[in-house]
């Protein structure tokens, strides 16, 4: 079965320190990979995506993500965390190739808490 | 440029009733996907509409149905509501050229459905 894992329910980081939110996936083929952020009582906001090419992709609000094909991972990173980065972060995968698949498959989410 | 809009924002229903949720896609988008997000979980794909037809469906019962109109807006209908249908219902729009499309899904703020 296809799945996305976010192994940490919560990540705590001090303001100004680098942050990493982990994501691994189990999907056949070469999927498209996405990160979204969700603030309380709000919908999901797109941060960045990996389709092909350079393994390091840059996105909104200073976030970037590193794709590692051998480890089937797509970790979200930011060099210096801000208190305003505190939110719920979701990794999503779109299977691609060989069969009809238009859906996004989601991880359970990681709550990021940035402490002043 | 208006983003994805959904109505209503909140809705309270009782078991056995029927509900209709509405979504207007982002300007220029022609595809609408619906997701259910239970509390503390990642979104689950319900179905996607393109060219006024359902082209993929997730693992949801027939009580969940939808429609897409010529102006690309969409409705999600849920019949015979159960307590377990209580969730945030998210609509996402995109410009899908097919299986190879790399377009991003952009989300609305969601409709919070409570079933009593």
Image: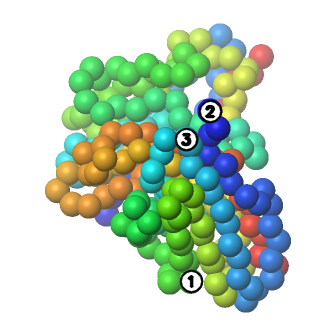
Q: Residues within 10 Å of mark 1 (few under 14, many from 20)?
A: few
Q: Position of residue B42 (x, y in %)?
A: 56, 54
Give me the chain letter of mark 1.
Answer: B
Query: Can the viewer see residue A108 in this picture?
Result: no
Whichever of labels 1 and 3 marks the residue nearer the N terminus, that label is 3
Q: In the rendered image, which residue does mark 3 sit on?
A: B27
Residue A34 shown left or right of residue B75 in the figure: left
Tell me how far mark 1 sits from mark 3, CA to CA. 30 Å
| Cβ–Cβ under 8 Å for marks 3 and 2 | yes
| Cβ–Cβ under 8 Å for marks 2 and 1 | no
Find numbered disc 2 in the image and state the secondary structure of the residue it sits on.
loop
Q: In the rendered image, which residue does mark 1 sit on?
A: B63
Q: Position of residue B13 (x, y in %)?
A: 80, 77
Camera-nearest residue between A75 and B101:
B101
Query: Can the viewer see residue B15 in this picture?
Result: yes
Camera-nearest residue between B76 and B15:
B76
Whichever of labels 2 and 1 marks the residue nearer the N terminus, that label is 2
> Image quarter for residue B112?
bottom right
Foreground: disc 2 or disc 1: 2
- Labels 1 and 3 share a subunit: yes
The residue under the point 51% across, 25% down is A20
Q: Which mark is residue B1?
A: 2
Instruction: Please tell me whether residue B106 is drawn above or below residue A55 in the rendered image.
Output: below
Camera-nearest residue between B76 and B60:
B76
Q: Residues within 10 Å of mark 3 (few under 14, many from 20)?
A: some
Residue B88 shown left or right of residue A22 in the figure: right
């Amino acid at each position: 079965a296809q799945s996305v894992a976010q192994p940490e329910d919560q990540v705590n980081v001090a303001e100004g320190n680098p942050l990493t939110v982990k994501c691994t996936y189990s999907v056949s083929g070469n999927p498209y990979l996405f990160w979204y952020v969700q603030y309380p009582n709000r919908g999901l906001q797109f941060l960045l995506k990996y389709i092909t090419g350079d393994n390091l992709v840059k996105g909104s609000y200073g976030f970037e993500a590193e794709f590692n094909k051998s480890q089937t991972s797509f970790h979200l990173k930011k060099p210096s965390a801000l208190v305003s980065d505190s939110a719920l972060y979701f990794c999503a995968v779109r299977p691609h190739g060989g069969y009809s698949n238009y859906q996004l498959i989601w991880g359970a989410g990681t709550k990021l808490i940035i402490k002043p | 440029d208006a983003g994805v809009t959904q109505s209503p924002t909140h809705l309270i229903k009782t078991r056995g009733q029927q509900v209709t949720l509405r979504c207007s896609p982002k300007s220029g988008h022609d595809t609408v996907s619906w997701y259910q997000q239970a509390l503390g979980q990642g979104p689950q794909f319900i179905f996607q509409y393109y060219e006024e037809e359902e082209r993929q469906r997730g693992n949801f019962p027939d009580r969940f149905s939808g429609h897409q109109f010529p102006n690309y807006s969409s409705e999600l209908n849920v019949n015979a509501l159960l307590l377990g249908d209580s969730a945030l219902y998210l609509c996402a729009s995109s410009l899908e050229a097919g299986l190879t499309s790399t377009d991003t899904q952009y989300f609305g703020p969601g409709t919070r459905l409570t079933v009593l």
